[in-house]
Image (tube, helix red, strand yellow):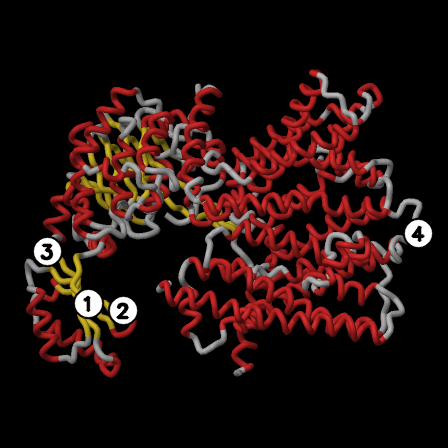
Amino acid sequence: MKTPLYYLRIYLSIVTQYIKAKLQYRTDFFISTIGMIFTNIAGIFPVWIIFHNIPSLHGLSFNEMLFIYCFSLLALSPLQLFFDNIWSIWSHLLSGTFIKYYLKPMNVMFYYMSEVFDLKGLSQVAIGIGGLIYASNQLDVQWTLLNIVLLIVSLIGASLIMISLMILAASTGFWIMDPWNVISLVNRFRDFAKYPVSIFNDFFKFIFTFIIPIGCIAFYPSQLFLNPLQDNEMIVFFSPLIGIVLFIIANAVWNKGINSYSGTGS
Amino acid sequence: MAMIRLENLSKHYKVLNRSEGLSGALKDLFSRDYRIVKAVSDLSLEVNAGEIVGFVGPNGAGKSTTIKMMTGVLKPTSGLLTVNGRIPTKNRAQNMQEIGVVFGQRTQLWWDLPVIESFKILRQIYRVDQSSYNENMNIFEELIDLKALYSTPVRYLSLGQRMLCDIVASFLHNPKVIFLDEPTIGLDISIKSRIREVIKTLNEHKQTTIILTTHDLSDIEALCKRIVIIDKGTTVYDGSIQKVSSMFGAHRTLKIQLPPAEYLALDQLATSVNGHFSQASAITMEQSEEGWIHFTINQDEVHLMDVLNYIGHHYPVHDIKIEEISIDKIVKNIYEGGLA
Amino acid sequence: MNMGRYLVIAKSSFMTRVARRSTFIFTFLGNLAYITVIYYLWMAVYEGNSMLNGMTFNQAFAYLALASSLFTMFQVYTEWFMSAHILNGDIITSFIKPLDYQFNKLFEAFGAVISNFITISIPTLLVIIFVFDTKIEVGLNLAFFVISLLMAMLISFFIDYMIGLCSFYTESIWGICTTKDVIVLFLSGAMVPISFFPEYLQTICAYLPFQAIYNIPLTIVTTPGLSLMDYANALAMQGMWVVILLLVSRLLHAVATRTITVNGG
C-alpha cells in the first residue's frame, strides 16, 4: 500500500523542482501575480462600491462582508494552488495523452494534479490572510485557540467543496471528451461564494445550501467567527462534513470516469 | 515461462449510431441504437520472459487497443490476459511497478524540469533503492551521454534525445516487461539506429521482456527474432522475422507519377508492363491519387531498375519514389497466401 | 478596401461560432446563474430604498443584467487568438495575405459578436424581460442603443487588439488578459453602475474609454426620458473613443511589427 507519506514526499519533490523551474521565468510569475491580485481585488470591488451607498446589506456590515470574502479566498486557494491542471484536461483527453497518467504505480488523480502547482495562487493566500486579519481587527473577532482550530478545520472542509465540484466538472470529460464548457460554468459559481446566502428566497437558499453548496464555502462557516458561538444554527458546523462527502463522491465519479475513458487514437 | 499470456482476448466497443442534424442530435439523447465495433477479437499470444516481440499491423488493426489492455488501461470484453502472472486491470497501480511504457509521441518525463530531476522523481515513485539507481544511471551514462543533458529541461530536448531519455527511464525501475509503442516514429535514420542499439543492449543486459510496435520493419529486423502481425483485431502471422524478411525483404514499392495528360493511359501502362515482363506475378500495380501508380516488385524475380527503365523509356515520367514494402502490403500479401 | 473579402471572414467566423452549440448553452446557463445572484443581491441593496443615485431597483437590475449579457456578447477572445498566432509564429502568414491584419481580426470579431448576440444575448435578454419581469423602455432609445452597441463593440475590439499585440513582447498572456478584463469590468460599470461610484472614481472613469463599452449603451437603454441632446452627447463621446483607439492601436501595431522585422521574428 502507498502511504500518504509516500505521496507527500513525491509531491514535495515535484513541486519544489517545478517552482525552481518556473521561477526562471520571473516576468511571467510577476505578471501572472499582478493578474491574480487584480482578480482578487475585483472580487470585493462591487461590495465596496455598494457600501458607499448603503450602511448595511441585509444586516451585514462592510467588514463582515470583507471577512466572508477573504474567508472565501482562503477556502478557494487550495483549488487554485493544487488543482489548476483541471483546466488542461480537455487537451489531454482529446489528444489521447491522458492515458500516460494510468501508467505509473500511483493514483491517477494525484499524478495528474501533481503536474501543476499554481504559483500565482500564493498571492491569493496572502490577500486572504491580510484581509481576514484586517476585518477581524475591525470586527473585534477574538482569535482564541479554539477559534483558530475551528478556522483551520472549516477552511480545509470548505476548500474541498469547490475542489469536488470542479473535479466533478472535469470528470464529465471522460464521457463527453471536451469538458471545457462544463468546467467554465462550474467555475463561475466560485465567484458566488462571497455573497450571503441570507439574501436569497427560500428556494435558492435551499439550492445554495444543499444542492450546489456554495454557501458552505464561506458564508456559513464565517458565521462561526462573526457571531457568538452559541447563537449559530447547526449548518455553520457542516462545511467539513459536506466537503468530505462531496470529495468522496467526486473521487468515485473520477475513478468511474478513468475506467470508462479509453483514449482516442493510437 | 510465459511473461505475457493472451487467450482468446476480445475487446468490443459499443458505438452510438449518430443521426444527422439537430433533430437527430435530440433523438440520440434517447435512442439506444448501438453498433458493436470489434477492435480485438479472439487474439491469442504467448510471450516468454526476455523475448523482444515485434507487434505490427496496419492502422486500426487493434494494436494500440491490445497494448492498452496489456498495460491495464483498458478492460478486455472477454478472454484471458495475464502479464507477469497478474491481471493488468486488477490492482492497476501495483502492477505498474513491474511494467515500463514508452509512447512515441508522449513523454513520461516532466516537461518543465531538467532531465536529471525527472529521473530522481521516477526513483521516488518506483521506490528504487540508491544502489540500483546508481548502477542503472551508470549503465545509461555509458549508452547515451546522459550527463550532458542533465540540466536541460525536457521541453528543450530534441525529439531523438527525448526518446533516448524516455527509453532508458523506462528501464530505471528494472521492470519485467516494457512496452515500446512506436519509439522511432518521426526520427531520422542515425538516431533510429542509436535507439535500436540502446534497446538491444538493455534487453540483453537485463533480460527484460519487450513488446515493440512500429511501422518500420527495419526496427523489427534489427531487434526481434519474432514478429506478430495482426489485422482486424486478430493474428494473421506469428513467427520468425526471418521468414517475413526472406519473403518480403526483396520487395520494393516503386511509385511513379505521370503528368496529368497521361492519367488516362493507366490501363494501357498496366497491360504494357505486364506484357513486357513475363513473371507477371512478381509485379502488382495499384493506382493512387494525382496520377501516382504504385508497383510492388519482388526483386528476386524482376529487378526494379528494369521496370523503371522500361517505364521511363516509354512514358513521360514526372516523379518517382522507391520505398521498402509497407506492413499494409505484407498483410495484403498474407491474405493472398504469401506466407502460407 | 475590398469589403467582400472581409464579409467572407465575418461570415466564416460566425459559422464556426454558431457550430459550437454546447458553448452557448453553457454560457447561457452561467448567465442565468449570475443574473439570479445579482437579482437577489440588488434586492438586498434596495431594501428600504426605492431610489439610489437616481436609479430604481428595476433600472439598476436591468442595467447589470444587460451588462452580463453584453459581456458574453463581446467576449470573442481576440486577444487570446492573437497571442496564440504571435507566439507560434503564424502571424507571419497573415502579413503576407493581401488583407489588413487588423481589419481581418475586426471582421472575425464582428462575426463572432453577431453569433454571440443571437445565441446567448437574445435568450438572456428574453429571460431578463419575461422571467425577471423587467421593463425596458421601447422607443427611440432602442435605435440609439443599437448604434451605441456597434461603437461599444469597436472600442472593446480595439482594446483587445492592443492587448493581443503585447504578445510580441511577452509570453505571459494569462496575467495581461486577466488584468485587462478586470480593469475593463471595474471601470466600465459592468459590475456596478457608474452612478454608484464615489465622486472621484466617476471623474476618473469619465476620462477613460472603458465606460463607453458598458455604461453608455446601458444608460441609453435603461434611462427613460433622455433628450436628443443627451443621446448625441453620449454617441459623440463613443465616436471620439473609436477614432482615438483606432489610431493608437494602428500606431502600436506598426511599432510592434517593426520590432519583429528587426528581430527577424
Instruction: Find out whether the residues at labels 2 and 1 contact each other: C-beta distance under 8 Å.
Output: yes
Q: Residue at x 75, y 28 (%)?
A: A137
Please tell me whether mark 4 or mark 3 is closer to you in this view: 4
* Residue at mark 2 to residue at mark 3: CA–CA distance: 23 Å
* Residue at mark 3 to residue at mark 1: CA–CA distance: 16 Å
Q: Dot 1 surroundings within 10 Å: few (below 14), some, or many (20 or more)?
A: many
Amino acid on which disc 2 is placed: Ser
Look at mark 1 in the image and give the residue it sits on.
Answer: B255
Looking at the image, tell me whether mark 3 or mark 1 is earlier in sequence order.
3
Indicate whether C181 appears above or below A193: below
In the foreground, A247 or B143: B143
Instruction: Find out whether the residues at labels 2 and 4 contact each other: C-beta distance under 8 Å.
Output: no
Q: Residue furthest top?
A: A145
Assign a secondary structure to mark 3: loop
* Residue at mark 2 to residue at mark 1: CA–CA distance: 9 Å
Q: Is residue A59 left or right of residue B148?
A: right
Across and down, in percent, residue C146 comes to 74, 72
Residue A199: image quadrant is: top right
Look at mark 2 in the image and give the residue it sits on.
Answer: B288
Amino acid on which disc 3 is placed: Ala
* Residue at mark 1 to residue at mark 4: CA–CA distance: 84 Å
Dividing the image into 4 quarters, which one contains the N terminus of chain A?
top left
Across and down, in percent, residue C236 comes to 74, 74
Look at mark 3 in the image and give the residue it sits on.
Answer: B250
Looking at the image, tell me whether mark 2 or mark 3 is earlier in sequence order.
3
On the same chain: label 3 and label 1? Answer: yes
| Numbered tag placed on residue C50 in the rendering | 4
Amino acid on which disc 1 is placed: Lys
